[in-house]
Image: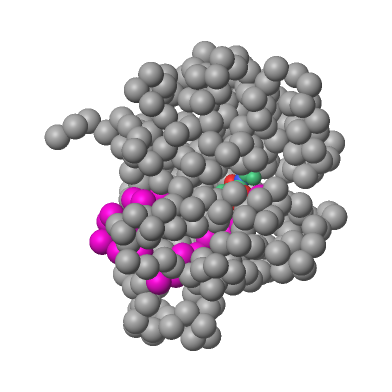
Amino acid sequence: RDRYTGLINRYRDHLPVNDDTPIISLGEGNTPLIRLKNIPRLLGKDVDIYVKYEGLNPTGSFKDRGMTMAVTKAVEEGSNAIICASTGNTSAAAAAYAARAGISAFVLIPEGKIAMGKLAQAMMYGAMIMQIRGNFDQGMELVKQVAEKAPVTIVNSVNPYRLQGQKTAAFEIVEELGRAPDYHCLPVGNAGNISAYWMGYSEYHKAGIAGSVPRMVGYQATGAAPFLRGAAVENPETVATAIRIGNPQSWDKAWTAQKDSEGWFDELADEEILAAQKLLAQKEGVFCEPASAASIGGAMRDIKAGKITEGSTIVCTLTGNGLKDPDTAIAQCQQELSSGARMVTIDAELDAVKKAI
Ligand code: F0G
């Protein structure tokens, strides 16, 4: 059996590369598709729910799929610097793949609004970090202006190679299920990923590899829900900092995915996102970051309401690893822990342990 060497080698027939392309890979892709056991039972509905656990990519998020392609093509085209605006995960992936390629990475992040793990990654992988006194949308505008003049390649999802890499997640799902799911649910921020999945499903459908396509369902946080408002949101706010975005760059592509797939957009309150994150961890043993939980939280609500029908197969993308954002996780558990129900501080003595048990 061939050693797995990343998604470009795996899917090269479906990607814009040739035999001379210098592939920059960290072995991304090939992530687990986990069938949920306990949550469907809790819902009391006859549904098959799978989570695509993208938090197991090399830098802990789905961004690695896009970044292997974007950095590979940047290097092929002779670029020696990349730049992005980011809520955290893109900057981590950009920094890692730039390190691997031996080129520079410049990242613009909103000061104080990125999860600790992501900041640690950008620092550790050696990126040049610009913390801006502003939000992601402002960073995105700055990056576009800079890249117009400076010899630096944008690796945000406005770079078409990003979506090419990310579409491979849909390929993996079709291959693993032997068909396309009936519904595909995912969190929506800058809206690149929903567009990429739709591209992937559509390509496999046209090629006759999948007999159908799923309905694409995009979930946003209430405080950052431009697709629900029908227009950009000025000051986006949510605990799910990864999707704290008010002016999505793939606006038209995401609407096309929603319309052509006969799917929909919906929104979740921060409390609902956090409750879903915790439920998934405590009932299924799968720890994702808050933004990722919007997919499962939204799907659960739509299954309960019957909007997602019984007998369906549903895939939810868990976009990032729970370890990315330890602060939010700990804050969320603090209350039940401090009540003494699940955490106590004791002397290092056998009696004390026995008593606690
Ligand atoms: N989930 C996570 C964990 C993310 O990091 C992002 C986007 C999304 C969902 C939304 O995906 O933007 O394709 O709709 N994070 C970007 C970043 C914006 O900078 O890391 P999208």
- Rendered location of residue 248, percent (x, y): 71, 51
Task: Name the outermost residue toward the left.
Answer: 1
Q: Position of residue 77 (x, y in %)?
A: 55, 19
Residue 138 belongs to magenta span: no
Q: Residue at x 34, y 22 (%)?
A: 19
Colour setting: one colour
Residue at position x 31%, y 59% in the image: 208
Q: Nearer the viewer, residue 288 or 8?
A: 8
What quarter of the picture does the C terminus occupy?
A: bottom left
- Give the camera-side residue of 40 and 143: 143
Q: Quadrant of residue 257?
A: bottom right
Q: Tell me: 271 left or right of 8.
A: right
Could you tell me if residue 33 is visible in this image?
no
When the figure is inspected, residue 23 is found, relative to residue 40, above or below; the finding is above
Residue 198 in the image, given as x and y percentages of width and height? 49, 57
Residue at image location 47% in from the left, 31% down from the top = 68
Magenta residues span 169-190
Residue 148 visible in rendering: yes
Residue pictured at 48% horizontal, 32% vertical: 69
Q: How many numbered marks appear?
A: 0
Residue 133 pos. (x, y %): 84, 36
